[in-house]
Amino acid sequence: MGEGIYCLDDFELYNIARDFRKQVYTLIEKLPWRERHSLGIQMRKAVISVTNNIAEGHGRWHYQENIQFCRIARGSVEEVIDDLNICLDQSYGEAAQSEKLKAQAYTLIAKINGYISFLRRCSQENRK
């Protein structure tokens, strides 16, 4: 599609988060009707925040700004994990699906942390 790391569609972290978002949307569709308009909306906002903040950080040309947006995205992933725990606690959907999503969420957090470390190293190298 695009050229180099500057194209969002080619950015690995964004694509991992995007896949996670799609999987969460699938779970939201399986929520009981009464929860689709409360928990479902909350989950949707949180998971959208993940990809939105990764995208916005990617579009920033300053390391510290990018890191800050990644931190926000990481917090939103944690929020989704809490929502998944609600699904597990209330027996919404299949437990295996929620557990799989939690595993994906922790993998995504690890990827975000790795990217933040990369950005910090780049920032330090630029200062030298």
Image: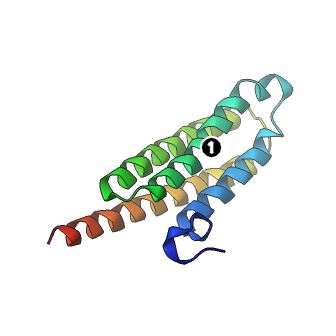
Residue at the spot x=57%, y=61% of the render?
Answer: 14
Q: Is residue 22 left or right of residue 70?
A: right
Q: Nearer the viewer, residue 26 or 89?
A: 26
Question: Residue placed farthest to the bottom in the image?
Answer: 3
**10 Å crowding of disc 1: few (<14), some (14-19), many (20+):** many
Residue at the spot x=77%, y=35% of the render?
Answer: 92
Q: Quadrant of residue 17?
A: bottom right
Q: Quadrant of the C terminus?
A: bottom left
Question: Residue placed farthest to the left in the image?
Answer: 128
Q: Nearer the viewer, residue 20 or 2?
A: 2
Image coordinates of residue 42 in percent, x first then y, are 65, 30
Residue at the spot x=47%, y=59% of the render?
Answer: 58
Residue at the spot x=75%, y=45% of the render?
Answer: 25
Q: Secondary structure at mark 1?
A: helix
Q: Is residue 50 left or right of residue 25?
A: left
Q: For the residue marked with disc 1, what is the amino acid?
A: Ile
Q: Quadrant of the N terminus?
A: bottom right
Q: Is residue 31 above or below residue 72?
A: above
The residue pinned by badge 1 equals 48
